[in-house]
Image (cartoon, grey):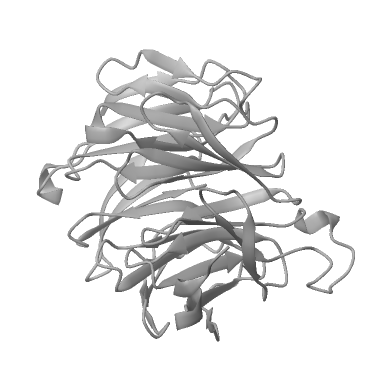
Amino acid sequence: MRPILMKGHERPLTFLRYNRDGDMLFSCAKDHTPTLWYADNGERHGTYRGHNGAVWCCDVSRDSSRLITGSADQTAKLWDVKTGQQLFSFKFSSPARSVDFSVGDKLAVITTDPFMERTSAIHVKRIAEDPQDQVSDSVLVIENPEGRKRINRAVWGPLNQTIVSGGEDAVLRIWDAETGKLLKETDKEVGHKQTITSLCKSADDSHFLTGSLDKTAKLWDMRTLALIKTYTSGVPVNAVSMSPLLDHVVIGGGQDASAVTTTDHRAGNFEAKFYDKILQEEIGGVKGHFGPINALAFNPDGRSFSSGGEDGYVRLHHFDSDYFNIRI
């Protein structure tokens, strides 16, 4: 399995996202310009220019026509995927950390960081069909009960009825998407012990995977918030993803860049580790990054995956046939 190295960012990667068809890959980094790549050969197709801060997160609509990005410049922007033109900019009074389109792309959930006196919050925006009709008003704003703690990720639950969020307080919460009422939260016993860094939904929205600095990833039921599985990594986890094809989860991380004293990529454990989803056993790893892995994404067809690192590279891996025959 030879990786394709994609060098288009000058700063560390923050997020990777495939479109629904799996032919395009979007990457976000701390260098202000989200980039679009062809997912089969890793060729750069174009960039989206307009942010002037690190871009933390992105999402693409189901028909691959719109892109939404959240940035440290205190905006979330809507883009035309094909032309790269900026369609709209949602302005906030603190950095936009996470963005997620609802099923049907009529709504988007955006989280903002704590900043000065402001607490971390979850905003629901209505996305207009015609960019001319777009307004910046929030349909719903949910303030984080843990005030100063950041929400790192918020996504839509099944049928857009709920919103699932997780962040620095290590607690996962399910909110009612209509009223903003807190429906469920994880307790300290079974939940993560440190900051939740990443959250990835299954293809059918029935369960989701979270990664945390406590060196574990956990699999949860999306409706009941029951803990299903725990995967132990040995290094802080920055990114998680699930195969849509096989029962595999992939976990990436590595100790913080500032804590790395050696440049030997073996020392920092900067590999993407594959686990059997059911048996929770490690089945393999993919090395290559010269710094912590910050982003992971599986192609929707399950035949390739990509990873983005602190080293500014995106590595695109097409699986060999052996991968599909792994037996434990």
Residue at image location 89% in from the left, 63% down from the top: 261
Residue at image location 62% in from the left, 31% down from the top: 168
Furthest residue toward right: 261
Furthest residue toward front: 328
Where does the C terminus fall, quadrant-wise? bottom right
Q: Quadrant of residue 259?
A: bottom right
Does residue 30 appear to the left or right of 62 in the view shown? right
Seen in the picture, residue 311 relative to 277 is either above or below; the reply is below
Q: Nearer the viewer, residue 305 or 111?
A: 305
Q: Position of residue 268 (x, y in %)?
A: 80, 63
Q: Position of residue 223 (x, y in %)?
A: 36, 27
Q: Position of residue 219 (x, y in %)?
A: 51, 39
Q: Position of residue 23 (x, y in %)?
A: 29, 74
Seen in the picture, residue 91 relative to 292 is either above or below; the reply is above
Residue at image location 19% in from the left, 41% down from the top: 127
Residue at image location 62% in from the left, 23% down from the top: 148
Seen in the picture, residue 5 relative to 223 is either above or below; the reply is below
Whether residue 14 is visible, yes or no, is: no
Q: How many marks?
A: 0
Q: Quadrant of residue 292?
A: bottom right
Where does the N terminus fall, quadrant-wise? bottom right
Does residue 287 appear to the left or right of 211 in the view shown? right
Does residue 61 appear to the left or right of 1 in the view shown? left
Whether residue 322 is visible, yes or no, is: yes
